[in-house]
Image (cartoon, rainbow, N blue to C red):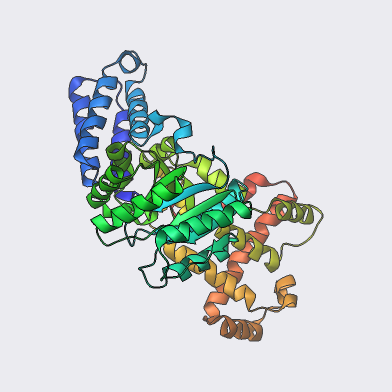
Amino acid sequence: MLDNLTQRLAKVVKTMRGEARLTEANTAEMLREVRLALLEADVALPAVREFIGRVKERAQGVDVIGSLTPGQALVGVVQRELAAIMGADLGPEASQLSFATQPPAVILMAGLQGAGKTTTVGKLAKYLREQKKKKVLTVSADIYRPAAIGQLETVTKQVGADFFPSLPTDKPVDIVLAALDYAKKHYHDVLIVDTAGRLGIDEAMMAEIAALHAALKPIETLFVVDAMLGQDAINTAKAFNDALPLTGIVLTKLDGDSRGGAALSVRHITGKPIKFAGVAEKLDGLEAFDPQRMADRILGMGDILALVEEARKGVDIAAAQDLAQKIKGGGKFDLNDFKAQISQMKKMGGMASLMDKLPAQFQQAASGANMGMADQQVRRMEGIINSMTPAERSKPELIKASRKRRIATGAGVQVQEVNRMLAQFDQMQSMMKKLKGGGLMKMMRGMKGMMPGM
């Protein structure tokens, strides 16, 4: 995510930190590099001009000039202004959804076809159920796109929310009013309405969504925009903002956007806060947008808070404590335990997702590693363990040549892959033995040898 912009700005940040004294010349040179990086990332020109102007003004202030480390202070100015342009200046409450209304709180989703509205409705329903403990109902008013209603029903059921059925022959306003009535009678906290999109902005679409807005009077009207559209995302956001009283923006496909221009431009152009970012295709791939943390990530400082949150969601604390007690009590770390560790890492989003949240120096250290390939290898290891019998998982020493051939056939891999997985398991088992004796530092040194680029 945002790879190109992060790499360019991380170099500028490194240069800034090394400056013992800021002069007009070196400050101008650094700002020129920042401006070029932003323009190459497809950030809208008005946003770039305002950002550079604000940084230049702050850079000439007392907080920088009087600092013992002016380069470090300038990094702080860039970070604060980057966060401000993405909405930090609106205050922490601006990026939160409002539920200050008589239930159900209606959330209207608007955007072009292909932006990922329907999937985002499912992700948002999951987020509201799990994070906010809300009873959620979804409904589709998209009567034009084939299978749109069925798609929403599928994703809604996958996340455990309720779905209100509709037919392509129904009128959109009738559909949403019936869903609203149903939500009231069945005590739903939130009603999320998926609307029809078009390949381009047209009067018919705007008139229809304006009519839906007038009928529902939603507490939140969210514009869903594909981050990979670049400048087109900005133009589309402006058109929707002119036609509808938007309350916020959802950026989708941010994980596939190496430039990141939309993330920096859309809030500036519309004046509306970015409330969520789609960072993965899976239905849990929706993050509440935090301008401060996104600024850190763009500048190559990482997002350790997000990493901790992923760990909190992905790690089964009770299982981890049971494993610790097992090892401490003299029990052996077996392939069932190894598989459990693999599953927990997958829940945290896989290697690519974890690396994206680490600071730039860690990402550079592993730059030679193919994270997509690493995730594929993790899935392959899990498949190999699934091909084993319960006895083999509990007692890996049973696995000799004939068993390896059977396991390889069952997993659809070569015997060499089974050998490689068992070698990695042996390394992990050795580290667990060191933990038993309190040798944490020995284990860390062992891990250092296993990690690429460290």
The residue sitting at 49% across, 53% down in the picture is: 192
Depth check, front residue: 23 or 349: 349
Give the tally of numbered discs: 0
Q: Is residue 163 above or below residue 85?
A: below
Q: Quadrant of residue 381?
A: bottom right
Q: Is residue 265 left or right of residue 397?
A: left
| Residue 124 image position (x, y, % from top left) | 50, 53
Against 100, residue 174 (above or below) is below
The percent position of residue 159, horizontal first and vertical second, equals 57, 61
User: Residue 139 appears at what percent x and percent y?
Assistant: 49, 60
Q: Which residue does the image show at 27% across and 39% down from the upper left?
A: 269
Of residue 71 and residue 352, the one placed in the foreground of this image is 352
Quadrant in the picture for residue 418: bottom right
Residue 36 position (above or below residue 279)? above
Q: Nearer the viewer, residue 9 or 225?
A: 225
Whether residue 333 is visible here, answered yes or no, is: yes
| Residue 365 seen in this snapshot | no
Q: Position of residue 442 (x, y in %)?
A: 63, 48
